[in-house]
Image: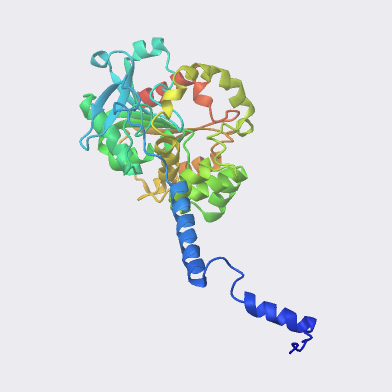
Amino acid sequence: MAGVARTVSAAAARAHTRKKTDGGSSFLPRGMVKKLSIVLLIGLIAWSYQAIQPPPPQICGTPGGPPVTASRIKLKDGRHLAYRENGVLKENAKYKIVFIHAFHACRYDVLPVSPALAEELGIYILSFDRAGYGESDPNPKMTEKSIALDVEELADQLELGPKFYIIGFSLGGAFSWPCLKYIPHRLAGAAILAPVANFWWHGFPSNLSREAYNLQFPQDKWAVGVAHYAPWLTYWWNTQKLFPGSSVIVHRIDGFSAEDIKLLSKLSSREKFLAQIKQQGVYETLHRDMIVGFGHWEFSPLELDNLFPNNEGSVHLWHGAEDRIVPVMLSRYITQKLPWIHYHELPNAGHLFPYSEGMGDIIVKSLLLSNS
């Protein structure tokens, strides 16, 4: 018996097809898709965590690390500090000075003092690599206080005596303030040159610190803000390629004043030791400096008491009026609030004024002979 022909409409055919394919639009079961999404999320978090982690430091003297070529001392906590002696022999010195170097610098970047003046006055200058720089071991627990204690222990091991002078330049100037706070009994005097100011120090009027903060390049506002508010992102921020990091790290030339540009040629001799500065890792030098320099300090320089109420010593602050790296207005305010500090503002000078001809001698003579 012949079969009965059935006519199927197009709509019915489409409905029949949908029934066959429902639930089959993905090659993976729904439960597997959910698990895969979780795995991808965990992978993204892990990748992000890895991206913000700095690589381990290449510590001098360890297998695979840079060689030790400098004179070094071993600190109580086991770290080493590398140092360099300048001027007359320590045994013949009348004045002993510890120099605290700037950002992206090292023990070779010492204040230029003429041999003639060093001989005439009997000046010995001890410069050193701050923690992580050059051939000094990194300090993962570095704070503004630990820097001052490093200075004191270095002076003790080099037998500088009960009192010595300090000179700090730029960020080294900022780290001179903790010496005034934590080891004032060891200081015969201090010269603080173009000191970097932390915009978040207590005592600055909010409108003043905001004005100084806004004088920076936009990329520096971000870099400094990250170092202060999200220090754990500092390495990533200054190494990623999406946004520009610190202009100081990349040596943006238009950040210098006209006078600074004239002085850059005097720094050409730095080429021979430039590679040594951050050989143990950019995080242990530049980034950690930013985190500490712009972090949450235990004190503010604006709260300091007079170190020398009987004029047995003196503190001097020098700043160039045309400094485009570190705004002068915050140094002005500090010295207005601390009138016992001798303030020297140089009308046409930029940030690099200590390297101008004869300036090192002027600074040192002012420090050492101001009470004579």
Q: Is residue 359 left or right of residue 141?
A: right
Query: Which image quadrant for residue 260?
Result: top right
Q: Can you say whether 322 is above or below 4 in the image?
A: above
When asked about the image quadrant of residue 5, the answer is bottom right
Image position of 226 (left or right of 123): right
Counting from the top left corner in percent of width and height, residue 347 is at: 59, 30
Dividing the picture into quarters, in which one does residue 64 lie? top left
Q: Position of residue 25 (x, y in %)?
A: 62, 70
Q: Judge from the rendering whether residue 60 lies leftward or rightward of residue 43; answer left or right.
A: left
Inspect this view and state whether residue 307 appears: no
Q: Quadrant of the N terminus?
A: bottom right
x, y percent for residue 218: 61, 45
Question: Which quadrant would the C terminus be assigned to in this image?
Answer: top left
Tell me if I can see residue 57 in this picture: yes
View extreme (front): residue: 1
Comparing 2 with 59, the one in front is 2
Between 10 and 48, the residue placed more toward the observer is: 10
Horizontal relation, residue 236 to residue 16: left or right: left
Tally the numbered discs: 0
Residue under the point 73% across and 79% down: 14
Q: Residue at x 57, y 34 (%)?
A: 323
Name the residue at 52% across, 20% down.
Answer: 267
The colouring scheme, among rainbow, by chain, secondary structure or one colour, is rainbow
Can you give x and y, in whole percent of width and height, for residue 272 in the image? 46, 17
Question: Which residue is at a point 29% across and 42% down the rendered structure image?
Answer: 182
